[in-house]
Image (tube, rainbow, N blue to C red):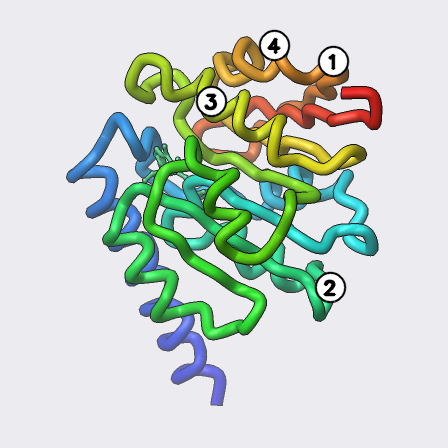
Amino acid sequence: MTRPSLRKRASRLFGQWGVFFRGFVEEPRMVGSIIPSSRFTINKMLAPVDWQRCEVFVEYGPGVGTFCQPVLDRLRRDGSLIVIDTNPLYIDYLKKHFRDSRFHAVHGSAADVIDIVKAHGHDGADYVLSGLPFSTLPDGVGPAIAEATHEVLRPGGAFLVYQFSAKARDFMAKHFRRIDRGFELWNVLPCQLFWGWKDAKD
Ligand SMILES: C[S@@+](CC[C@H](N)C(=O)[O-])C[C@H]1O[C@@H](n2cnc3c(N)ncnc32)[C@H](O)[C@@H]1O
């Protein structure tokens, strides 16, 4: 009884990792990692989210969707998860594998988050999660994304960022007065975690 289900799970896992790895080989600077995030990173990153007040959750750079199911598992029934990735390979994969009506996969850049959120009928987002490799993005893209993210967030919301280096923090610091910081060792590679909070006066 357990064998077929184990086999199914193993093939799904390697299928997912295979697609992720292919994306890395094709666009190494845009993907920035050869292995998806660990469950330790996922749990720590999402821990401060107030799911009751989260109507719109946006994710930048979902890749093959490592965070998507954990977010959907926590998200309200009337919530929306909008994921944005520049790689069409990943967006096609996500559209095939996530059938949840709250899930919306968009092929585009995080820099266009304001228009993308509006196009989905919302005036802003409660939380934005980023797995973008800020250190290797083309010049100017990181600062533009940090600015657009601050603008799209509703007061009380937060920008959740994980990255191997602390580069993202430099971009966040221009817009977010309060940035909490964490670290996750159990990840390939160990990574830095940041939570930039948008307060009511911002
Ligand atoms: C390190 S991977 C993230 C992997 C995944 N979130 C995880 O935790 O396993 C970075 C992702 O960012 C995407 N990306 C790079 N630049 C982007 C941009 N400007 N807007 C949206 N996605 C982008 C890449 O295509 C890739 O899927």
Q: Which residue is mark 4?
A: 174
Rendering coords of residue 10 (x, y %): 37, 67
- What's under tag 1, amino acid-wise? Arg
Q: Earlier in the sequence, mark 3 or mark 2?
A: 2
Residue 177's disc is: 1
Q: Secondary structure at mark 1?
A: loop
State how far apart marks 4 and 2 are (Cα).
31 Å
Looking at the rendering, the quadrant in which ligand 1 lies is: top left
Cβ atoms under marks 3 and 4 closer than 8 Å = no
State how far apart marks 1 and 3 are (Cα).
22 Å
Residue that appears at 53% across and 28% down? 148
Q: Secondary structure at mark 2?
A: loop
Rendering coords of residue 170 (x, y %): 54, 9
Q: Secondary structure at mark 3?
A: loop
Tell me where residue 76 sits by quadrant. Answer: bottom right
Cβ atoms under marks 4 and 1 closer than 8 Å = no
Residue 164's disc is: 3
Cβ atoms under marks 2 and 1 closer than 8 Å = no
- Mark 1 Cα-neighbour bin, 10 Å: few <14, some 14–19, many ≥20: few
**Of tags 3 and 2, which is closer to the observer?**
2
State how far apart marks 3 and 2 are (Cα).
30 Å
Q: Which residue is mark 2?
A: 76
- What's under tag 4, amino acid-wise? Lys
Q: Earlier in the sequence, mark 3 or mark 4?
A: 3
How many marks the image carries: the answer is 4
- What's under tag 3, amino acid-wise? Phe
Question: Can see residue 184?
Answer: no
> Viewed as shown, does residue 192 lie left or right of 60?
right
- Mark 2 Cα-neighbour bin, 10 Å: few <14, some 14–19, many ≥20: some
Query: 57 or 3: which is nearer to us?
Result: 57
- What's under tag 2, amino acid-wise? Arg
